[in-house]
């Protein structure tokens, strides 16, 4: 099976001690308790919404806060000290609702008393307000006292309205208390539904393989005793094509065109090096700008359907045969985890509320780096505490054991990770059982360790184990070496991109509208003058804007721009095939995609593919 420890993998659940079993078993979902909170909230009533292996989770109404609620987890060993059972929760809820109703009525009565002698009917159901006001004013014996009463009402009524609103929010919170109880009682069914959905998904994944397989190349199969090598790293079509780049560019509109590229002998053996092997592909790693204009600066490979960018394509080799299995699922950067990713035999630490799991060793290393950086910053600030907040917080981590209130959450996340990675096991088992594309082969049981090891081998090519310990190539070092021979007349690439960015910054992206007949320095162009400080000067001409010369005349404007050499690449120092060194190593290939335009433009230029 996949590298997940079964016997010793997840720590044993130890939350409930033997002396507390009878007490704990009396706690049920839907019961109400008074939670003794020493914080700002004070004591609050809460309903048990979840019982974990080592905790009880409660939720209760938050009075005077619309839509808000209290929620807390209490460790089972502290529960008796923190929580007190409510004997009659329905009476408590009804009493709370009646209390807030009485407070609302009290506020409304106060408004009536304030307005009754002022000629104002707060309900709006009385006689015409204008005529009544005149009668009250005319009949008042003390106009100043009446005016004072009006001023008092003007100030007090908005205050009462705010108080009524506050009491109404409290009442609404308690009206929703019964809903908390009901949701808690049906919460367990959600887990059952999730399990059923997972089962249905697994059966569908296993049974639905036959319809989604395309036989691309036919030939002799591999021997029966040949194991299936499953490659860990997901590949990307646009990146792999760089190693077989052809002058003139490439535009693949359909997956079938990539199939033909992969069928070439060199590509076939490089990407699927074992007689029986399986590798996952996606079209591209990053989102693609889809309006391809036909030049090298906007596209390398262009498969038009956006939804295919997100799909997973499994290519399977069996001897001389090549198959493609299409899947709408996203299997992640790695099809299966590293050997120690889900091996929990050493002490582990949980970050926050079970968001991340790391080894104790990794935690201690991160902690030491944090303290070293903090001390260095303190020395820079003359002994004062660092002003910055480091992204690593020591306090956010806690041991991954039954003492953590988020132990169950992490166990659940681990289980989901195992399920996620085991999807590939279902696919592989289905390929052996329900198709003939891996024939001949012995009976395979992926759930049996011995059968798994004899039939399948996991190739950990995502963990750098296939590429030795040598450092990956550096594009910046290569660029500096080539640019060392920059001089007037050198052909370069990079200047047009730099010029466009400068124009966009100055004109908010509208430079094409401002200069409709401005060609710019050119995608590939000669350096007019090289300054020893590391800058290159480019010159060109553009047509005047808004003059008669724009309509057939020969009026031209001289343009000049000075660009730092770090944004340029000296094509004269480039040798055919140099680009491959930066794309051959999968550890760093994605970093160099942004330099592909420069390198492939140089490849085309020296090969005579561009003027």
Image (tube, rainbow, N blue to C red):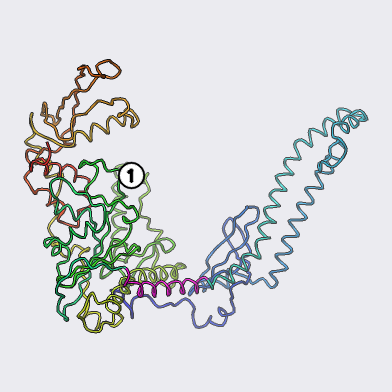
Give the residue at x 86% y 28%: 144
Report the front residue among 16 and 518. 518
Report the front residue among 574 and 202. 202
Residue 305 as seen in the image, left or right of residue 160: left
Report the front residue among 159 and 604. 604
Count neighbours of disc 1 (C-alpha within 10 A) and say few if under 14, some if 14 to 19, many if 20 or more: few
Residue 438 as seen in the image, left or right of residue 150: left
Report the front residue among 40 and 294. 294
Q: What span is colored magenta in the figure?
A: 190-211
Residue 91 as seen in the image, left or right of residue 9: right
Q: State which quarter of the image contains the N terminus.
A: bottom left
Q: State which quarter of the image contains the C terminus.
A: top left
Give the residue at x 39% y 69%: 416
- Residue 490, position as x, y percentages in the image: 8, 33
Q: Main secondary structure of the magenta part?
A: helix
Choose top left, top right, bottom left or bottom right for residue 334. bottom left
Residue 516 in the image: above or below residue 31: above
- Residue 274, position as x, y percentages in the image: 15, 70
**Residue 204, magenta (yes or no):** yes
**Residue 120, magenta (yes or no):** no
- Residue 530, position as x, y percentages in the image: 11, 28
Residue on which the image places disc 1: 383
Q: Residue furthest top?
A: 548
- Residue 225, position as x, y percentages in the image: 16, 81
Choose top left, top right, bottom left or bottom right for residue 155. top right
Callout 1: SS? loop
Give the residue at x 75% y 58%: 99
Q: How many marks?
A: 1
Choose top left, top right, bottom left or bottom right for residue 40. bottom right
């Amino acid at each position: 099976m996949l590298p997940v420890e079964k016997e010793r993998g997840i720590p044993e659940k130890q939350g409930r001690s033997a002396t507390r079993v009878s007490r704990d078993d009396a706690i049920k979902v839907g019961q109400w308790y008074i939670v003794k909170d020493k914080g700002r909230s004070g004591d609050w009533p809460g309903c048990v919404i979840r019982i974990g292996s080592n905790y009880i989770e409660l939720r209760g109404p938050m009075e005077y806060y619309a839509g808000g609620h209290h929620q807390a987890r209490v460790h089972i060993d502290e529960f008796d000290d923190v929580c007190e059972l409510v004997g009659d929760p329905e009476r408590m809820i009804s009493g709370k609702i009646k209390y807030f109703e009485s407070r609302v009525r009290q506020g409304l009565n106060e408004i009536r008393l304030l307005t009754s002698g002022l000629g104002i009917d707060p309900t709006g159901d009385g006689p015409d307000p204008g005529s009544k006001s005149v009668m009250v004013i005319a009949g008042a014996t003390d106009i100043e006292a009446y005016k004072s009463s009006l001023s008092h009402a003007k100030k007090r009524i908005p205050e009462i309205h705010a108080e009524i609103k506050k009491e109404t929010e409290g009442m609404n919170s308690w009206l929703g208390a019964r809903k908390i109880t009901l949701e808690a009682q049906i919460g367990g069914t959600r887990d059952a539904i999730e399990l059923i959905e997972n089962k249905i998904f697994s059966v569908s994944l296993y049974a639905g393989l036959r319809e989604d397989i395309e036989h691309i190349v036919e030939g002799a199969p591999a021997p029966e005793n040949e194991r299936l090598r499953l490659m860990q790293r997901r590949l990307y079509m646009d990146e792999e094509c760089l190693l077989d780049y052809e002058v003139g560019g490439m535009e693949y509109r359909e997956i079938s065109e990539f199939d033909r590229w992969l069928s070439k002998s060199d590509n076939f053996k490089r990407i699927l090096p074992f007689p029986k092997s399986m590798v996952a592909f996606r079209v591209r790693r990053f989102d693609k700008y889809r309006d391809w204009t036909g030049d090298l600066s906007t596209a390398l490979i262009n498969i038009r359907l956006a939804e295919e960018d997100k799909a997973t394509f499994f290519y399977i080799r069996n001897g001389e045969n090549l198959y493609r299995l299409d899947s709408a699922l996203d299997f992640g950067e790695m099809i299966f985890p590293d050997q120690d990713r889900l091996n929990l035999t050493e002490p582990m630490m949980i970050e926050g509320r079970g968001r991340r799991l790391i080894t104790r060793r990794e935690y201690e290393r991160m902690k030491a780096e944090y303290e070293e950086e903090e001390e260095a910053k303190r020395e820079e600030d003359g002994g004062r505490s660092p002003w910055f907040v480091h992204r690593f917080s020591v306090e956010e981590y806690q041991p991954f054991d039954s003492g953590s209130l988020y132990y169950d959450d992490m166990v659940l996340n681990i289980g989901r990770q195992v399920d996620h990675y085991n999807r590939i096991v279902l696919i592989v088992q289905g390929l052996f059982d329900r198709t003939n594309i891996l024939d001949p082969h012995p009976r395979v049981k992926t759930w049996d360790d011995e059968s798994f090891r004899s039939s399948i081998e996991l190739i950990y090519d995502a963990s750098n184990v296939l590429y030795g310990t040598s450092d990956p190539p550096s594009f910046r070092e290569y660029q500096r070496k080539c640019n060392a021979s920059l001089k007037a007349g050198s052909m370069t690439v990079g200047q047009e991109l730099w010029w466009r960015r400068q124009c966009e910054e100055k004109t908010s992206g509208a430079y094409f509208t401002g200069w409709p007949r401005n060609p710019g320095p050119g995608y590939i162009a000669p350096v007019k003058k090289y300054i020893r400080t590391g800058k290159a000067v480019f010159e060109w001409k553009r047509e005047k804007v808004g003059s008669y010369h724009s309509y057939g005349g020969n009026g031209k404007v001289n343009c000049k721009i000075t660009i730092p050499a770090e944004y340029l690449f000296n094509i004269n120092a480039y040798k055919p095939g140099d680009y491959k060194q930066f794309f051959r190593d999968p550890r760093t290939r994605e970093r160099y995609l942004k330099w592909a335009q420069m390198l492939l433009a140089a490849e085309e230029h020296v090969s005579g593919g561009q003027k």
